[in-house]
Image (cartoon, grey):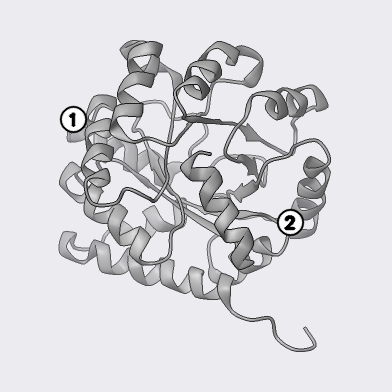
Amino acid sequence: MSRIAQTFALLRQQERKALIPFITAGDPDPAATVPLMHTLVQAGADIVELGVPFSDPMADGPVIQRASERALAHGTSLAQVLELVADFRRVDPDTPVVLMGYANPIEAMGYARFVRRAQEAGVDGVLTVDYPPEEAAGFAALLTDTGIDPIFLLSPTSREERVQAVARLARGFVYYVSLKGVTGATHLDLAEVQQKVWALRRAIDLPIGVGFGIRDGATARAVAEFADAVVIGSRIVQAMEGVPRDAVEDRVAQLLREIRQAMDAPATVGA
């Protein structure tokens, strides 16, 4: 059983939902990444999603695009991201780490080499935004064979054929994009998202995480009522912008603790 599967199993026993925060590796600078990852865990993260910076992030809104630009300005590469994960693992052997990025850096490194180095570094899952399941069977098999979970996106516009393909290939969890558009958008219809997640459960026997549009504790709690995980990225990256370098960890910790507390708060009687 993978670390991701173990995490979800433990959370089910505790009747809790996973909190999966996202940061971009190398933002605000490479030296900040590993301390930030530890800060996320200490503030309540169950799984850490680490973005691999890319020059043309098609699914990301302006906030995460700027984070990628800052990271790339510091020379952050896929190879360096893997080194950062290995550094994180020297202190934290338990918290799952998911890499989220795009195909180009992986293809430049080479599929087999990337998978081998990711395994050695301690990566638990890989979500490649521009690898649709219809084209990723070979890559997914490489990951699965080395104990790394291939994770896929589904969206409000995903057709049944894609849902079935994801059901066959995915491991760990499935990331449901809660709205049309890019990261950082805010027009979230919770009732519609809930209906979509319920529909996906009929086809997919994996935990379902919901991301995009979650910006505060109240929304995170509402999503946690029907999803297995809450993914939050742009709001965290936005909170880091404009903050003095020595205050970034405290700002991120404060925000994530507020979201964790909201998700874990007991239900109000009569609510």
Return the mark for residue 189.
2
Give the residue at x 54% y 17%.
141
Give the residue at x 48% y 22%.
143
Element at badge 1? loop
Q: Which residue is mark 1?
A: 75
Q: Amino acid at mark 1?
A: Gly
Give the residue at x 38% y 42%.
50
Q: Is 78 on the left or on the right of 129, as rendered? A: left
Quadrant in the rendering for residue 104: top left
* Mark found first going from the N terminus, 1 or 2: 1
Q: Is 96 on the left or on the right of 158, as rendered? A: left
Visible residue check, residue 27: no
Visible residue check, residue 66: yes
* Disc 1 from disc 2: Cα separation: 38 Å
Q: Amino acid at mark 2?
A: Asp
Location of the C terminus by quadrant is bottom right
- CB contact under 8 Å: marks 1 and 2: no
**Percent x, y of residue 270:** 80, 88
